Structure formats: C-alpha cells, structure tokens
Image (cartoon, rainbow, N blue to C red):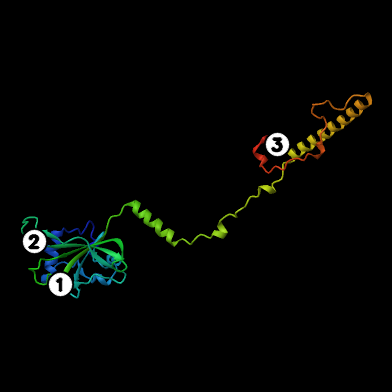
Amino acid sequence: MEFDELPGFRFHPTEQELLDFYLTKAVSGQEMVDIIGFVNIYNHEPWDLPGLAKIGEREWFFFVHRETISGRPKRTTEKGYWKATGSDRPIRCSMDLKRLLGHKKTLVFYRGRAPRGSKTDWVMNEYRLPSSFVLSKEVVLCKVYRKATSLKVLEQRAAMEETARAPPPNVTSSSPPIIKENFSSYEQPKSFNKFLLEQNNVVHRVDGMAAIEEEEDSRNGYPSQIVGAVPIREHYSELQSPKLFLDWSIDSFWLN
C-alpha cells in the first residue's frame, strides 16, 4: 500500500526535518523510506511536477542533482526559468541555535525568457546542506508549491483569460446603423397646416368685407379712408405661411 493511500497519513515535514533527516541521509547514501524521489525538475514545467512526486497534496518534494553552467546552477526550463528572490536564509537547529543545519533559497517561476518573463504563482524552496558536508552542493532538496492567491485575483485572472480568448466584435453586424437627421425634410403636422388654411380663409373673408364697405362708402359720398388712420385693407393674399423647421412634437398645441 502506498503512503498516500494510508488513512490519515500526511507528509508535512519541518525545515529542520528536511535538512537534518531527509537531505542528510540522501547525501550520505543512508537507507530511508522512499518517500522523496530524485527528479530533474528543470526538465519539466512546475505545473507538471505534482504528477512526478511520490506524495503530496499542496506541497511536493524532490531530491535534485544540481547542474551548473559556467559555474552557475542551471534553473531554466523549456517555457521559463526560476528566479531567486532575496538572499539565502540560514536554517538552525531549534535545540541548538549555534548549530547550522543548512540554507534555504526561495525562487519564483517566470514564463518566457529573462529579463522579460511573466511572473507566476509557482514557488520553490531549495534546501542545501552546509559546505562542511561532502557533496553538499551536488544534491539539494526542493519543495514546490503554488502561492496562495485570493479569490478576487483568481476571478480577475479568469476574466482576463476569457476576454483574450473571445473573438473581436464585428462592428458592421452588431452596431446599429447611424441615421443622420435632416430637420429641413420634416413635414409639418397636418393639424398645423389645417390651422394655417383656416387663417388664410379668414383673411380672404375680411379682405372681401373691406372691399364691400369701401364700395358702399363711395356711393354714400364718404371718404374711403381717414387721414392718419391705418388702412383697413392690406394685401393679405400675398402673405405666405412661414416655413417652420422645428420639431412640432415638443408642443402639444400644434397636435390638437
């Protein structure tokens, strides 16, 4: 039966246990329980590593043979690279603070190539023994995990990915046609035209009555007009209704 199949079994070692027990035994060649395997993690992307670990739920552990290029450790993969953050932190024995157990280096995975890589939430803690140990620089113990991310950040990231996958909008098919309004082409309401026609008829009737009165005055010997008075008859027939280009719908008077 495998360890991950045992009910209630969890593998959560402390940093002191990782250095003083597991890594020390792996470097010295001592026998121990096969719970952490040797994997060249730099031949794989971080999201593939959980499937290569012998055990782990949210943290995955590996022994790694360090490879160097021009004296520097190799930490690149096919799709990215691991970048160190800060300086190494010494790990000391909790019972004896003068006793140095090893060092811890924290690295973050970036997609792409340096220095323009894109930071991810994959993190690795690399543990190595002090230089006094033989082969201390040849074998290290790595713990890989994903940094805890808030729900809001995850939702924003999912929304950005969904937007990036969505096809661009079709402006010609989805946008409504643009209608250019020409106020000069508006027709006057029928009720207003009717009103002007009635007023024109009234003017013609007044004009006719004035002509009859003038004719009767001339027969009776009265002057047709009083000096200084305003002429009664005007050329009303020459009046024309104004061309109004307003929107009569805004005034309820013209709609009655």
Residue matched to label 1: 138
Mark 1 nearby-residue class (10 Å; few <14, some 14–19, many ≥20): some
* 245 versus 108 height, above or below: above
Q: Quadrant of residue 221?
A: top right
Which one is earlier in the sequence, the residue at label 1 or at label 3?
Answer: 1
Q: Label 2 near label 3: C-beta < 8 Å?
A: no
**Mark 1, secondary structure of its residue:** loop
Residue 254's disc is 3
Q: Amino acid at mark 2?
A: Leu
* 228 versus 242 height, above or below: above
Tell which of 166 and 170 is nearer to you: 170
Mark 3 nearby-residue class (10 Å; few <14, some 14–19, many ≥20): some
Q: Amino acid at mark 3?
A: Trp
Residue farthest along the right direction in this orientation: 219
Task: Determine the residue positioned at 19% across, 58% down.
Answer: 12
Residue matched to label 2: 100
The image quadrant where one finds the C terminus is top right
Task: Determine the residue positioned at 82% across, 26% down.
Answer: 227
Q: Label 2 near label 1: C-beta < 8 Å?
A: no
Image location of residue 98, percent across then percent down? 5, 58
Image depth: mark 1 or mark 3 in front:
3
**Mark 3, secondary structure of its residue:** helix
Mark 2 nearby-residue class (10 Å; few <14, some 14–19, many ≥20): some
Q: Amino acid at mark 1?
A: Glu
Task: Determine the residue positioned at 68% across, 48% down.
Answer: 184
Left or right of 200, for residue 43: left
**Mark 2, secondary structure of its residue:** strand
Left or right of 239, for residue 208: right
* 38 versus 17 height, above or below: below
* 237 versus 44 height, above or below: above
Image location of residue 154, percent across then percent down? 35, 55
